[in-house]
Image (cartoon, rainbow, N blue to C red):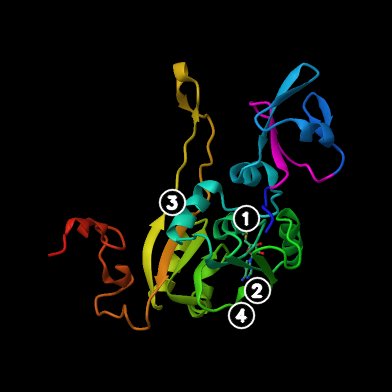
Amino acid sequence: MEDLLADRILVTDLARFRRVVDLRASGSVGLPSGHISREELAKIPAGGTFEVRDKRYYVLPCDMHDFIMDGLKRNTQIVYPKDSGYILIKLDICPGRRVAEAGTGSGALTAVFSRAVGPEGRVYSYEQDIGLVNHAAKSLRLGPEDRNVVIRHQGLEQGIHEENLDAFFLDVRDPWKLLSIVYDALKPGGHLGILVPTTNQVSRVLLAFNKTDYLVTEVAEIFLRTYKAVPARLRPMDRMIGHTGYLVFARRMQPGALSRPDAGPESPLGRGDDDGPLGYGDQDIEDD
Ligand SMILES: C[S@@+](CC[C@H](N)C(=O)[O-])C[C@H]1O[C@@H](n2cnc3c(N)ncnc32)[C@H](O)[C@@H]1O
């Protein structure tokens, strides 16, 4: 399986200019001070530098952060790296896993999943908009069957082809409508993650979970503040990504495993609200 980022490089002036260049494309590359051909760029070693009209540029192999933030054309909101890194951990994604998502959107999370599951794993990505299906397939360089990603052009409510999935991620407007169909596609104990941009949607998701056999494990929001790396005047960047979305995580339980008399809307699954959904305050209790 070919690497998604093969033959992609980052060209930067170490200030505002950052451009991901696909060396397989044709034509020259526009720079703030002129142009350079792809043939010339391909000869510059990783970590090397060049000048065009007295302005200096630097060349690096494109990494996943570069690809998502500076290389991927966005036709939708995307899942940002600050969130997708945590999503990988919470959904326990590793090589060989079978994971699905809806919707594909611009393919940012699809790309992260694809690299994480590796050649032995599979990513099944559902998208109802054919324009976005084609856009993501092009961005991710997907041929018909040559990679570990299968994009399915359909609304998720029309059915999920896969069974026994390790994990599922929902980044759609109405995820609470899809909990039961995803439940049937997950393996017992499998992970579900959801991203929604508003707190109202989080509440609707939690209320919907109350009627299911999922264990809600966490509701989270991730803040990332980066710094100006100037030793003498170390301080945060002036701007940051202030809000992306809220993350909700759950596990598929056996039918009926969570039915208990004290479970209600004020106390999802009857666990109280002092220590978070899983009662992490109890972790200092040792075995006999
Ligand atoms: C916010 S975008 C997803 C962005 C994507 N996670 C990324 O990182 O690029 C939401 C996408 O979900 C798609 N969508 C919404 N409801 C859907 C459904 N029920 N089934 C499949 N796709 C759906 C929309 O067409 C849209 O492309």
Quickly name the residue at label 3. Answer: 221
Residue 199 appearing in the image: no
- State which mark lies toward you, 2 or 1: 1
Which comes before the other along the chain, label 2 or label 1? 1
Q: Secondary structure at mark 4?
A: loop
What amino acid is found at the position of numbered circle 3 in the picture?
Glu
Q: Is residue 142 magenta?
A: no
Is the residue 222 above or below the residue 107 in the image? above
29 left or right of 48 in image: right
Which quarter of the picture shows residue 223? top left
Q: Secondary structure at mark 3?
A: loop
Quickly name the residue at label 2. Answer: 155
Residue that lies at the very extreme toward the right in this rendered image: 27
Q: Which residues are magenta?
A: 6-25
Q: Where the C terminus falls, by quadrant? A: bottom left
Q: Which residue is found at the position 45% from the left and 22% from the top?
A: 234
286 left or right of 144 in image: left
What amino acid is found at the position of numbered circle 4 in the picture?
Gly
Q: Mark 2 near mark 1, Cβ–Cβ under 8 Å? A: no
Please state which of residues 93 and 247 is positioned toward the viewer in this rendering.
Answer: 93
Q: Position of residue 68 (x, y in %)?
A: 63, 47
Which quarter of the picture shows residue 268? bottom left
Q: Mark 3 near mark 2, Cβ–Cβ under 8 Å? A: no
110 left or right of 277 in image: right
Q: Which mark is residue 159?
A: 4
What amino acid is found at the position of numbered circle 1 in the picture?
Ala
Give the Cα distance between marks 4 and 1: 23 Å
Q: Please rate how many residues cluster around mark 4, counting C-alpha atoms within 10 Å: few if below 14, some from 14 to 19, many from 20.
A: few
Asked whether mark 2 and ligand 1 are closer than 8 Å, the reply comes as yes
Residue 92 appearing in the image: yes
